[in-house]
Amino acid sequence: MPKMQNFIESCLFGAAKEISTAKAKGLRIKAKARNDMATSADFASESFIVNRIRKSYPDSVVLSEESYLKTDLKADSLFVVDPIDGTHNFIQEIPLWGISIAHFSQGKPTAGGIYLVPQNELFYAEKGKQSTLNKKKISVSRKARLEDFFLLCDTRINNINDFGYLNGILALEKISQHTRFLGVAVHDMGYVACGKADAVIHFKLKPYDFAAAAFIVEQAGGTVTSLEGKEWGLESTKFLCSNGKQHKRIIEVLKKKV
């Protein structure tokens, strides 16, 4: 059985090559639902990663975006995979997308890696160890005032409105330095983990979107909770990841209704 860090990193690099090969052959695009797409590169990446898991960790189960959606989230050994996070950006050739692999045991994260392929940035975290970016230790920002925060937010505007948070987001925009929408969870959370952004708010995520990235933020010294301030897990959908300095205040501002 290989060392987990070596295994996850080699899977991420290998999957990136599979994506490049699939793209060179010409992408085939499948519409799963309205505004929800997958490409031949997604499936090639997923197949490569899952085959590696089956070979090296045969007793593990897999949760993955395209083909492995039903599994036991409390399994002793669970790999959570997003073969391409940011597929729409990838299709449009916007260089904001990545690959994510996390390992969980009995519902708790033990290791996770995300690879921002266009930037060649690989983030990794393991239980009991500080997060790294390209092998160098990273930590969240030290900004203390919300007025100085660079915030990221990631969802459709109509979702924010439907969930009742639009006025809260507008209030945060007025208080903070900036609020930006990137459209990909691995970038958002990775940037909070390494201090490029101070907080990110997500309103509608699936486990494969955040499993590795949220853990990486925590291991970089950040705070990750639901939007109610509760502990996060694989069944969570709404997230706040921050440097911890104004976490409670952001949650309070988000509750603003008018």
Image (spheres, rainbow, N blue to C red):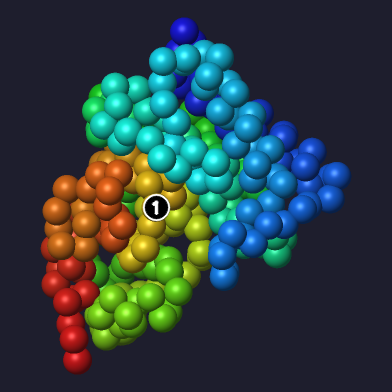
Q: Could you say which is closer to the camera, residue 25 or residue 95? A: 25
Q: Residues within 10 Å of mark 1 (few under 14, many from 20)?
A: some
Q: Residue at x 14, y 53 (%)?
A: 230
Q: How many marks?
A: 1
Report which quarter residue 226 is drawn in.
bottom left
Q: Position of residue 85 (x, y in %)?
A: 54, 51
Q: Position of residue 258 (x, y in %)?
A: 19, 91
Residue 145 appears left or right of 158: left
Above or below, 154 against 244 in this view is below
Above or below, 241 against 61 in this view is below
Name the residue at the front extreme: 70
Q: Residue at x 78, y 47 (%)?
A: 23
Q: Residue at x 49, y 53 (%)?
A: 187
Q: Is residue 196 visible?
A: no
Name the residue at the bottom extreme: 258
Amino acid, disc 1: Lys
Residue 13 appears left or right of 200: right
- SS at mark 1? loop
Q: Residue at x 55, y 45 (%)?
A: 66
* Residue at image mark 1: 206
Residue 12 appears left or right of 75: right
Q: Could you say which is closer to the camera, residue 239 or residue 48? A: 48
Q: Position of residue 55 (x, y in %)?
A: 56, 14
